[in-house]
Image: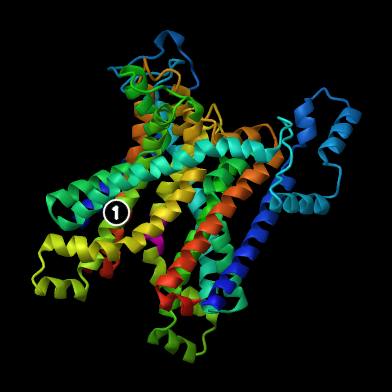
């Protein structure tokens, strides 16, 4: 077991190192100098050079890479070129919008997907199953930013139940903050709920065809009891994997939804930083998101190995 | 049910493809001609899908937009297919070798990157436009095709007919090209349809934030972005391009499901 964890930890470290090299390289080879970008087209050469020196852009690439990585390990993500404030502070501020938004969306998605998937599986081949599957096909096909626009028109502009955009800070009341995240969370949750319903349905159908389910039925358990006591628990493994993956996606994938609702989250931060050539912010936020995905995958792998010893031997 | 998916999906996809192809020869109105007096008309006899804020015919823009969406998605899938499949086949040929490990770990690494953020990063840093959008979307198709083709090829390498081909002295490359590839083609077609629909959504998303196809070339995502400030008084500006995206993605997904049912006997059996 320890050997397995060690192997996975080495693989995790290598992945993180490679990811940091890739992110740094993509941003480095991109055309456009941040200093020239910040000062505009009429800037003098010496002014640009002075700013480059101030931002540390005059150093060679290798030392800049190492100072970026070593800084990140210590929690220092550098200073934003545009806002001149520490990137770590900006991330801390924004993560309190993105993280709750992702969790909220995940909660909505799970609340829709579980009953829908279980219902479809129990109604397999019948009209109810077809209706749920048809609805999930629609859910997957709808672009979430379009759905967000439609939600704004109906619930913000026509019914005036929610605001059309912006975020109410947590200090002004948790309920108000949650209210401002409701429409974005619904928009984000729709495609995820559709995917999760389908996974839930097929996992449950597969579990229901197992021998132990037949045994339970033969022992006289009712259909409902078998589903709730035996099938559902076993069907949860693939469903939880997808929920884990969706969480990472929701953290990073909210970038367009945050644009639609003018939410000051990580997605909007990285989008603004990209357009303003604030490369240090871009590098750090992307690295943070990749770190989250790789670490979540690592934890899931190790947790599986603890639960199921067969998986340890596969690697 | 399986045939219904394929038929419905095929019909919806055909509708979009025909609209895109017809747009090369004919569109109801010239979209380069602005006509402010005709602006923001709701669907009527002259303009079947209405007009936008510049008085341009929305049906014509949707038809040309279909061309843009399909072209970007096809090329992005092409990148994934032509790079990913050979990599997956090579990895399967040398299972557990350094080559296999390198290819698969690189795949895992690409999967760890938030695709949308990276696509936005690439298009923003290297210039907004259809070509960079194609590359950005295509990069994330590579590991998908590599993984699918490796997985399918690995099980085929255990089969007797492959052993027979090896005994007859064929090289790994020839076996991969002549025996493995034709046998996994069905699976790749199904995966291709799924990636194609994801490509349509990604292109729309990139164009929506202004990093995909650039004006004056119409794109559905761009039309949605333009409609955002007018959606409260001219909802058709958002509903029509949105519906075009939904119809295309729905058509492709249904077709993918139908094809999988038709081509993969295991899925067919499990559904029956």
Q: What residue did someone put label 1 on?
A: A198
Residues shaded magenta: B188-193
Q: Which residue sits at x=45%, y=12%?
A: B35
> In the figure, is residue B18 to the left or right of B124?
left
Q: Position of residue A17 (x, y in %)?
A: 67, 60
Q: Position of residue A20 (x, y in %)?
A: 67, 54
Instruction: Give the quadrant of the C terminus of chain B.
Output: bottom left
Residue B253 appearing in the image: yes
Q: Position of residue A5 (x, y in %)?
A: 55, 72
Which residue, as the protein is rendered here, is positioned at the far top? B37
Which residue, as the protein is rendered here, is positioned at the far left? A220
Question: Which residue is nearer to you in this view: B82 or A163?
Answer: A163
Q: Main secondary structure of the magenta part?
A: helix
Q: Position of residue A248 (x, y in %)?
A: 49, 50
Is residue A51 on the magenta stretch? no
Is residue B190 on the magenta stretch? yes
Q: Which residue sits at x=45%, y=42%?
A: A102
Which residue, as the protein is rendered here, is positioned at the far right? A46
| Rendered position, B26 above or below B45 | below
> In the figure, is residue A41 to the left or right of A295?
right
Neighbour tally class for label 1: few under 14, some 14-19, many 20 plus, Cα within 10 Å: many
Q: Secondary structure at mark 1?
A: helix
> In the figure, is residue A108 to the left or right of B148?
left
| Rendered position, A31 above or below B145 | above
Residue B7 appearing in the image: no
């Amino acid at each position: 077991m320890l050997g397995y964890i060690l192997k996975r930890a080495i693989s995790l470290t290598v992945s993180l190192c490679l990811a940091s090299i890739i992110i740094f390289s993509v941003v480095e080879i991109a055309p456009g100098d941040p200093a020239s970008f910040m000062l505009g087209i009429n800037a003098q050469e010496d002014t640009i050079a002075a700013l480059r020196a101030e931002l540390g852009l005059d150093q060679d690439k290798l030392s800049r890479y190492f100072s970026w990585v070593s800084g990140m390990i210590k929690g220092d993500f550098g200073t934003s070129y545009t806002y001149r404030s520490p990137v770590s502070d900006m991330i801390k501020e924004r993560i309190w919008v993105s993280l709750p938004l992702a969790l909220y969306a995940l909660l909505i998605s799970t609340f829709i997907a579980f009953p829908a998937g279980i219902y479809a599986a129990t109604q397999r081949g019948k009209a109810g199953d077809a209706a749920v599957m048809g609805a999930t096909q629609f859910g997957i096909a709808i672009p979430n930013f379009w759905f967000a626009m439609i939600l704004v028109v109906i619930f913000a502009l026509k019914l005036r139940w929610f605001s059309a955009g912006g975020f109410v800070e947590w200090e002004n009341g948790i309920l108000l903050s949650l209210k401002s995240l409701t429409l974005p969370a619904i928009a984000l949750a729709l495609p995820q709920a559709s995917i999760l319903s389908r996974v839930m349905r097929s996992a449950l159908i597969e579990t229901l065809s197992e021998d132990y389910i037949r045994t339970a039925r033969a022992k006289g358990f009712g259909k409902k009891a078998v589903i709730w006591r035996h099938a559902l628990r076993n069907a949860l493994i693939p469903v939880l994997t997808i929920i884990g993956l969706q969480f990472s996606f929701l953290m990073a994938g909210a970038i367009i939804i945050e644009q639609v609702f003018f939410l000051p989250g990580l997605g909007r931060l990285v989008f603004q930083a990209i357009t303003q050539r604030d490369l240090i912010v871009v590098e750090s936020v992307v690295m943070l998101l990749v770190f989250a995905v790789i670490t979540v995958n690592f934890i899931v792998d190790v947790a599986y190995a603890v639960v199921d010893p067969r998986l340890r031997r596969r690697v | 049910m399986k045939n219904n998916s394929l038929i419905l999906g095929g019909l919806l996809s055909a509708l979009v493809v025909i609209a895109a192809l017809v747009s090369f020869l004919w569109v109801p109105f010239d979209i380069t001609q602005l006509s402010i007096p005709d602006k923001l008309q709701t669907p009527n006899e002259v303009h079947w899908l209405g007009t936008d804020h510049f008085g341009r015919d929305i049906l014509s823009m949707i038809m040309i937009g279909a061309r843009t969406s399909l072209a970007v998605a096809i090329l992005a899938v092409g990148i994934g297919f032509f790079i990913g499949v050979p990599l997956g086949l090579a990895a399967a040929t040398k299972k557990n070798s350094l080559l296999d490990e390198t290819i698969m770990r690189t795949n895992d690494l690409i999967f760890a990157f938030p695709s949308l953020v990276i696509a936005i990063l690439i298009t923003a840093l290297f210039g907004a436009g259809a070509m960079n959008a194609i590359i950005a979307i295509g990069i994330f198709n590579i590991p998908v095709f590599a993984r699918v083709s490796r997985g399918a090829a690995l099980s085929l390498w255990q089969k007797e007919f492959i052993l027979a081909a090896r005994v007859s002295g064929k090289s790994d490359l020839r076996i991969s090209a002549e025996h493995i590839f034709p046998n996994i083609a069905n699976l790749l077609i199904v995966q291709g349809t799924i990636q194609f629909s994801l490509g349509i959504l990604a292109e729309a998303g990139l164009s929506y934030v202004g990093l995909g196809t650039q004006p004056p070339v119409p794109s559905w995502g761009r039309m949605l972005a333009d409609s955002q400030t007018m959606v409260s008084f001219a909802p058709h500006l958002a509903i029509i391009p949105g519906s075009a995206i939904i119809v295309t993605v729905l058509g492709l997904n249904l077709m993918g499901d139908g094809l999988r049912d038709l081509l993969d006997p295991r899925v067919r059996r499990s559904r029956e």
